[in-house]
Structure formats: structure tokens, C-alpha cells
């Protein structure tokens, strides 16, 4: 009789006994009860065991029922010892009950009565819920749900108040116990001792705080000194790096200065040699003039004239040498390279080498691997290609394979952007002042 979902079944039945109408209500399992109410007056007729006795008197039955019908009476298990008379009475009651309810059961399951019952049940359910099963507004079910919610909220509010009151009572009890402890002499002595100990601990903590403050100040000073030392160390490293760079630059400048001094020394020696030649020529000229004067006085005839002509020719040569020396001095004075020309020439040499390396790397190459070392060899132009030898070419090349034919190779290289020619032209422009006086055969000097 208990549903699969659990719960406590509640059954209500309206019966008619003579002219009286009664409603019998029974609940089973937990919270079980039974009561009988007079429907006409709403008066409670009986409840609990009195209700069970009222029902028993109505049916005069026992534990069993007719045709699988069982009257369940609370408090009776059906295993009590029974005499023959009670069993006969129960059998008679079951027979009479079956005869009385058989027509009612057939009438109810026949259709019309069942339809009336279902309509009445649907009408009663319609007063409580909507077609979707929700509580109908204004109905008893909705009112009961609202009342339940209000009571639940009130219960929560009262539970909160009870909890607050309980907590307040607990605090009050704790405060009363604490007050009793404070009013005792032992507690006062203990508090005084605790205050004294706290003052001593406070003084010690204050002294410790002063020491800690001093230590923190020393720590801050040490950190500042460390930061200053780190900054000085970084500045020293930067200064050292700058000094090393300056030393490197100074070495390069000294090297270039030494080279210039060496060139100046060579030019000075050349000038000294030229000056010595001038002095020798002047001495020769002086001697020649004196000799010419002597010969002019002594020579007569053709020998004297020829000698005079010879010395005049030598004098002209000396004059030419002197003019040449003056020209050389003027040219040597003009040999001055512009400032930074050496560094610019070095940078141009590096750039030209890089461009040539890139062009050489971009040149197409060809390599032949021979199957037999003693076989015929492929030639490229007038040169024979060795086994595994890699050789480059520009634009177009022809490979002559004996017994096979001529193989023509073409490469579509990118157009020359003119960077190499521009760099070489710029380098030639920088070399031009020095190249003008590089070869001076008239001075007897060769600069390289």
C-alpha cells in the first residue's frame, strides 16, 4: 500500500450509516492516526483507538476481508489466536460485505460512476492547480504554499533571533565569570603581576626597537655605501673601456704618424741628395767659369773655341739640373694627402674586397666527377677540368666532352649595380695626388 517513492499514505472515505454521513480518515506508517468526523455538523466523533473501534462496529469484521479485500486496522497484526466462532463471524461478515460492495464495484467500474468520480476529482484538482500542475492563484493550495513560505521565513527569522539571543547569553555568562574572576584578590594580584611583567616586556621591546632602528639606519648607510661603490665601479669600468679605446686609437695614430715621418724622411733624403747635386753643380759651374776665364785668355784658335763651347754646354746642363731641382722641390711640396684620406682608403679597400667576394660567390661554377680515372677529360676553353675540380665562369662557357660533343652553359646573373666600379673610381681619385708624383725620373726619386 506504500508508494514506491515513500511517504505516508493518507486515505479518506465518506460513508453513510442510516441517515448519518461520516468521513473516515486514516494515515499509515509514520505519524499514523485515525479519526471519524460527522459531515453534517463537522464534529469530531472519534479518533485514534476510538476511531478504530467505531469502524470495527460498523463492519463487524476481523483481520481478513472478502474477495481479496482486507480491512487494515491499526494495532492488529492478524496473527493473534482466534477461536472458531470469531472465524465464522468474520467469514459471514466477509460474505455479506462482498455481497454489499459487489454491486458498487461493478457500478463504479462500469463507466458512468467512474466518469463522475473522475470529473469530480478533476474539478477538485482544478480548484487547486492549473493545467500544467502549478498552484492556482487564490486557491487553497497556493494559499497553503504562501503560508508555508511565510512560516519558513518567520522560522528562519526566529531562528536567527534565537541564535543571537543564545550568543548574547553565552557572552553574558562569560562576562559574569570574568567579572567574578576580576573581583577576587587572587585575580587582582595576578593582574598586577601580569601588568608588571607586561611593562618589563614593553621596556625590553622598546629597547629592542631602538636597537633595531639603529641597526636599520646602519643597514641603510651600508646600502648607500654599496650603491655608491657600485656606481664608482661602473664608472671605472666605463672609463677603463674608453681608455683602452683611446689607447687603440692612439696606437693607430702613432702608426700613421710613423709612416708619414718615414715618408717625410725619405723625401728629406731625396731633397738633401738633390741639394748636394746642386751644390756640386754650382761648384762645377764656378770651377768651369774660372777655367773658362783662364781658357779664354789662353786658348786661341779652334781648340779654345771648342773648349769654350763644351763648357758652355756643361753650364747649360747645370742650369737645367738646377731648374729640375727647383721643379722637384715644388712637386715635393705639393705631395700632401687630405686629412682622413688614409682611413677612407682603408675603408674603400675593405668595401671593394667585400663586393668582390660577393660577386665571386655569386658566379656560377661547374664541376665534373669522372667515373673512370683513365677516361677522357672534359675541357673548358683551353683548360682541362680535373676530377672534382670546381671552376667558375662569367655569362657563357663551353664544355668539350670527347666522344659526346660541346656543352654550352649560360648563366643569367643579376646586372652589375656599379658599386664596385664606383668604389674603385673613388679610390683612384684619392690616389690621384700621390700618383702624379709617384715617378719622377728627372729628380731620380721613385715613391711607392
Image (cartoon, helix red, strand yellow):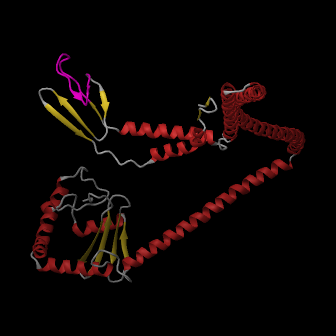
Q: In the picture provided, is 69 more to the left or to the right than 430?
A: left
* Range of magenta residues: 367-386
In which quadrant of the rendered view does residue 62 lie? Answer: bottom left
Image position of 165 with respect to 210: above or below: below
Image position of 109 with respect to 386: above or below: below
Q: In the picture provided, is 263 more to the left or to the right than 102?
A: right
Image position of 361 with respect to 49: above or below: above
- Magenta stretch, main secondary structure, is loop
Whether the magenta-drawn stretch holds residue 375 is answered as yes
Measuring from the top left, give residue 255's x and y in whole percent.
68, 30
Measuring from the top left, give residue 74's x and y in whole percent.
31, 59
Quadrant of image for the N terminus: bottom left
Measuring from the top left, give residue 397's x and y in whole percent.
25, 36
Tally the marks.
0
Image position of 177 with respect to 119: above or below: above
* Residue 17 appears in the rendering: no
Looking at the picture, tell me which residue is in the foreground, 397 or 76: 397
Amino acid at each position: 500500500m506504500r508508494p514506491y517513492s515513500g511517504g505516508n499514505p493518507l486515505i479518506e472515505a465518506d460513508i453513510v450509516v442510516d441517515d448519518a454521513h461520516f468521513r473516515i480518515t486514516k494515515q499509515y506508517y509514520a505519524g499514523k492516526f485515525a479519526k471519524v468526523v460527522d459531515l453534517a455538523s463537522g464534529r469530531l466523533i472519534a479518533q485514534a483507538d476510538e476511531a478504530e473501534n467505531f469502524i470495527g462496529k460498523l463492519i463487524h469484521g476481523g483481520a481478513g476481508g472478502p474477495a481479496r479485500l482486507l480491512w487494515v486496522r491499526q494495532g492488529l497484526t492478524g496473527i493473534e489466536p482466534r477461536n472458531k466462532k470469531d472465524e465464522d463471524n468474520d467469514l459471514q461478515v466477509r460474505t455479506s460485505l462482498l455481497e454489499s460492495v459487489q454491486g458498487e464495484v461493478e457500478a463504479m467500474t462500469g463507466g458512468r460512476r467512474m466518469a463522475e468520480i473522475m470529473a469530480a476529482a478533476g474539478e477538485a484538482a482544478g480548484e487547486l492547480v492549473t493545467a500544467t500542475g502549478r498552484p492556482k492563484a487564490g486557491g487553497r493550495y497556493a494559499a497553503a504554499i504562501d503560508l508555508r513560505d511565510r512560516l519558513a521565513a518567520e522560522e528562519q527569522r526566529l531562528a536567527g533571533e534565537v541564535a543571537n539571543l543564545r550568543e548574547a547569553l553565552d557572552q553574558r555568562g562569560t562576562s559574569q565569570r570574568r567579572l567574578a574572576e576580576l573581583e577576587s584578590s587572587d585575580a587582582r594580584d595576578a593582574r598586577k603581576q601580569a601588568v608588571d611583567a607586561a611593562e618589563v616586556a614593553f621596556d625590553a621591546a622598546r629597547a629592542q626597537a631602538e636597537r633595531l632602528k639603529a641597526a636599520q639606519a646602519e643597514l641603510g648607510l651600508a646600502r648607500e655605501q654599496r650603491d655608491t661603490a657600485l656606481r664608482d665601479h661602473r664608472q671605472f669600468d666605463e672609463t677603463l673601456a674608453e681608455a683602452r679605446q683611446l689607447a687603440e686609437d692612439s696606437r693607430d695614430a702613432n702608426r700613421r704618424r710613423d709612416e708619414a715621418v718615414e715618408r717625410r724622411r725619405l723625401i728629406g733624403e731625396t731633397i738633401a741628395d738633390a741639394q748636394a747635386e746642386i751644390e756640386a753643380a754650382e761648384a762645377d759651374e764656378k770651377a768651369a767659369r774660372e777655367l773658362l776665364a783662364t781658357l779664354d785668355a789662353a786658348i786661341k784658335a779652334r781648340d779654345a773655341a771648342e773648349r769654350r763651347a763644351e763648357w758652355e754646354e756643361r753650364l747649360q746642363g747645370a742650369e737645367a739640373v738646377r731648374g729640375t731641382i727647383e721643379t722637384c722641390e715644388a712637386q715635393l711640396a705639393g705631395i700632401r694627402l687630405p686629412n682622413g684620406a688614409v682611413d677612407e682608403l682603408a675603408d674603400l679597400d675593405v668595401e671593394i674586397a667585400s663586393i668582390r667576394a660577393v660577386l665571386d660567390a655569386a658566379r656560377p661554377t661547374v664541376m665534373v666527377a669522372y667515373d673512370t680515372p683513365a677516361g677522357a677529360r672534359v675541357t673548358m676553353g683551353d683548360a682541362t677540368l680535373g676530377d672534382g675540380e670546381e671552376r667558375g665562369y662569367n655569362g657563357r662557357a663551353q664544355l668539350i666532352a670527347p666522344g659526346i660533343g660541346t656543352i654550352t652553359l649560360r648563366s643569367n646573373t643579376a646586372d652589375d649595380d656599379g658599386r664596385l666600379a664606383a668604389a674603385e673610381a673613388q679610390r683612384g681619385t684619392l690616389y690621384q695626388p700621390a700618383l702624379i708624383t709617384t715617378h719622377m725620373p728627372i729628380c731620380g726619386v721613385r715613391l711607392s
